[in-house]
Amino acid sequence: MLPIPMMTKLQKNIYISMLVAQGVILSLLENMIPYPFAFAPGAKLGLANLITIIAIFTMKKSETVFLVSMRLILATLLGGTISTFFYSASGAFLSFLGMLLVKQLGPKRVSIIGISAAGGFLHNVGQLLTTSFFAQSWAPMLYLPFLSILGLLSGIAIGIAANYLLKHVQTLKKFQLDYEQTTKQKWEIF
């Protein structure tokens, strides 16, 4: 098999821009969906996290941090408030850091779906910690058991979708192969 040429800086910037745009669109679309869980106010599916999990497997960490930051800022400017920014940012960055840590276990111990499930759980933890901070009470953490289940299920669904996209979308496959060449770590896509 011939080595795949490295992506140019322009190709990488266009790729990051496209992922940011897709993440913002998914965030805005998700904001239009009524909350499905009346007993857990604010519970959402986390569709924009699909872009984060794809980025983790196709880009360097610094590029992914930039992508997540831009997605949060733009989604807030286009359809949020400063409080939604704090909730989204705490969940997104705790989720991102957790997914990076779980990914360190390697492809023999954890799959993309498992990494995404951990991210779904940690996203809720981050948001509940922010809620507790603003409320100056630990009472919001009582939602954690229920939101943990929702976060894990959502994370699994997002992981399955990411797995499918990484396997079937040629552009993502190119960036994943480029990323795997630089990190020397190959992830099996099922």
Image (cartoon, grey):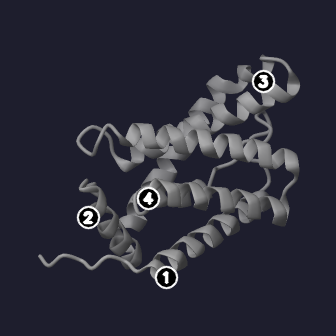
Q: Which of marks 2 and 3 is nearer the N terminus?
A: 3
| Residue lying at the far left of the rendered structure | 1
> Which residue carries the number 1 mark?
10
Q: Name the residue under label 2.
A: 181
Looking at the image, residue 117 lies above or below residue 168: above
Q: Say which residue appears at 27% left-offset and 79% top-offset.
A: 5
Please tell me in which quadrant of the rendered image residue 121 appears: top right
SS for tag 4?
A: loop
Amino acid type, callout 2:
Gln
**Circle 3: is it few (<14), some (14-19), or many (20+) Cα within 10 Å?**
some
Query: Residue at label 4?
Result: 60
Quadrant in which the N terminus is drawn: bottom left
Q: Earlier in the sequence, mark 3 or mark 4?
A: 4
For marks 2 and 4, give the CA distance. Answer: 12 Å
At numbered mark 1, what does the secondary structure look like: helix, strand or loop? helix
Find the distance from the CA under tag 1 to the CA under tag 2: 19 Å
Q: What element carries label 2?
A: helix
Residue type at mark 4?
A: Lys
Horizontal and vertical percent position of residue 108:
23, 42
